[in-house]
Image (spheres, rainbow, N blue to C red):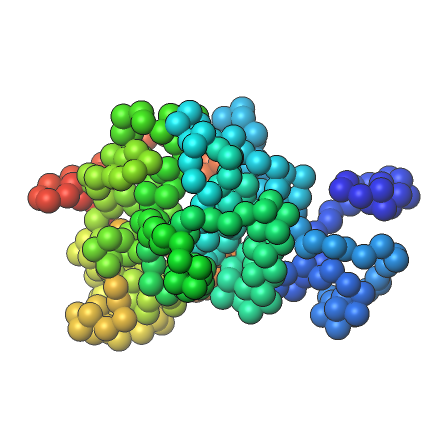
Amino acid sequence: PTTPLHLLLVDQFEHPLVMTSGNISDEPAVVDDAEAYRQLAEIASFALTHDRAIANRVDDSVVRVMGGRSRVLRRARGYAPAPLRLPSGFENAPDLLAMGGELKATFCLVKDGQAILSQHQGDLENAATLDDYKKNLALYRSLFDHAPSAIVVDRHPEYLSSKRGRAEAVNSGALLIEVQHHHAHVAACLAENGRPLHAPPALGIVLDGLGFGDDGAIWGGEFLLADYLGYQRLARLKPVAMPGGAQAVREPWRNLYAHLKAAGAFDATPSASGDWSALNGKPLATIDWMIEQDLNSPLASSCGRLFDAVAAALGVCADRQVYEGEGAARLEALAAAAPNETRGYALRISESELIDIDAAP
């Protein structure tokens, strides 16, 4: 329970209560009565209200025990904005403002050798979330008397957070620093593990959904030799087309077909296509044409899309994902419930300028 009111409610029941934030999917949590009546009337039977206003919207934190350690997956209520002490070498770092990404966004103020990370903001494509992001950014800068000498943005040209950061750098005269998405992931891991600023580079293995690469391509399964200041890209998952672009993120069957096609492992004859029931009735000829014509089918070295393909092959939310990452989450649950027997899986390795790791069957 996060409030005394929750304790009073729990005391009235002998069985567990499941609580979730008061919001429609993808919208920020509701923070006043009028908004609650307007947005939640169709999904809530009753409303319990009180006369104490919510001054600052903060989402639920999410913590998971993995390998015997508690790991914070979403840092919000109960954690933010407690400062995080940065490793040795950052004591005299200038004041920085890092704008964050566009999905599951947070921003960060660097001040006096500490990182002041905001609570989870959500996906900035949502207008209400973007408005909340702007309000919280102004609040944090006021509370912590923060005037950055440099503004740090993701290199993606279309992220709303990056666009705002670029505009603010122009308006304020602050130095603009653009950082590659996956290098930022590695740097965060280095800091979390207390690695000093001037330590030698470490090997970072970054497996995520999508990020804008330095070559303009979509990255997402990267092996980087990196420190805080730079990186060398050593290897990647072999790029595979994403037919439909963003639509392929929502519809895992597209990734399944693209991976099978890239591997030469799909036989379209009726007797063979039944082995891939997730593809029955799908417009595969159209997808073939899109990939061959390079029409809205960007190549991506994405681990997230590989997980989607495997999930679809097993019949898991193949047609459409209800929420982001559903295929991967359900695939993980299936793996956790499977027998303990494990067997190796052979990956084909090829090398030119980069090492390509091919997960094709």
- State the image quarter where residue 230 is shown: top left
In which quadrant will I find the N terminus?
A: top right
Total tally of numbered discs in the picture: 0
Which residue is more in the foreground, 106 or 298? Answer: 106
Residue 69 visible, this orientation: yes
Residue 306 visible, this orientation: no
Q: Residue at x 27, y 25 (%)?
A: 200
Which residue is more in the foreground, 89 or 351? Answer: 89
- The image position of residue 252, as x and y in percent, is 39, 60
In this image, 186 relative to 13: left or right?
left
Residue furthest left in the image = 352
- The image position of residue 168, as x and y in percent, is 44, 61
Which residue is more in the foreground, 5 or 313? Answer: 5
- The image position of residue 40, as x and y in percent, is 74, 67
In this image, 313 relative to 350: left or right?
right
Q: Residue at x 24, y 46 (%)?
A: 237
Q: Residue at x 57, y 36 (%)?
A: 83
- The image position of residue 77, as x and y in percent, is 66, 44
Q: Residue at x 54, y 26 (%)?
A: 69
Residue furthest front in the image = 173
Which residue is more in the foreground, 270 or 205? Answer: 205
